[in-house]
Amino acid sequence: MSRAVYPGSFDPFTNGHLDITERGASIFDELIVAVLVNDSKRAMFSVNERCMMAREAAVHLPNVKVMSFEGLLVDFMRQEQSRVILRGLRAISDFEYEFQLAQMNKQLAPETETFFLVTDAKYSYLSSRSVKEVFKFGGSIKDFVPPGVFRRMRERIPQRQ
Ligand code: PNS
């Protein structure tokens, strides 16, 4: 059985993340969306909120599980008995960072393989950071995030679209 891990900060989970999750779930028998427990002071949402939003967005995908992880990704991979890291690639600008991450993970755990899915063109401009920025300055983020994420972001500042 093939089990892949799709790691990220997911602060918040966007339609681009959902696209990679859906496509990953159609390729692998099981897909774990792994939410990094990172510096909560810098994140807009707590790790629990980020997990809940990802879970809600992927509720239609029975072979997707959302979990949080702390520390090294390769340790989590070993714990979950998975060898495949799934990442989305948007533009060339992503490549350098992704290449470094994949090489480092390979160095730390030679059994791991990083698989890249090229982001659907309609999401190529989308990132959690840009969604937060548009939201912060009052722009509409409705088309960029799953409905549950939209709702939660609006709960933060109700007058926002
Ligand atoms: O969505 P992001 O923030 O680009 O995801 C980055 C992530 C979570 C995949 C990466 O930061 C990560 O795996 N962090 C855990 C620590 C680790 O294992 N780092 C790899 C060696 S540099």
Image (spheres, grey):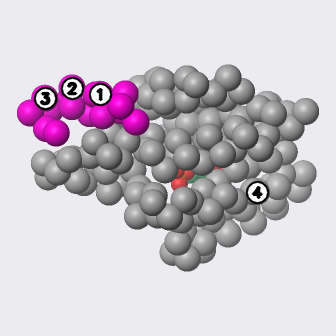
* Residue occupying the point 35% across, 47% down: 144
Of 78 and 134, which appears nearest the observer?
Answer: 134
* Residue occupying the point 32% across, 39% down: 44
Q: Is residue 56 visible?
A: yes
Q: Secondary structure at mark 1?
A: helix
Tell me, yes or no, whether the highlighted magenta stretch contains residue 28: no
On screen, residue 1 versus residue 27, left or right, reads right
Of 135 and 120, which appears nearest the observer?
Answer: 120
Q: Which residue is mark 4?
A: 114
Residue 130 placement (x, y as % from top left): 32, 57
Of 132 and 61, which appears nearest the observer?
Answer: 61
Q: CA distance from mark 1 to mark 4?
A: 32 Å
Q: Amino acid at mark 3?
A: Pro
Q: Residues within 10 Å of mark 4 (few under 14, many from 20)?
A: some
Residue 91 placement (x, y as % from top left): 52, 72
Give the label on residue 155, or none: 2
Q: Earlier in the sequence, mark 1 or mark 4?
A: 4
Is residue 118 placed above or below 86 in the rendered structure?
below
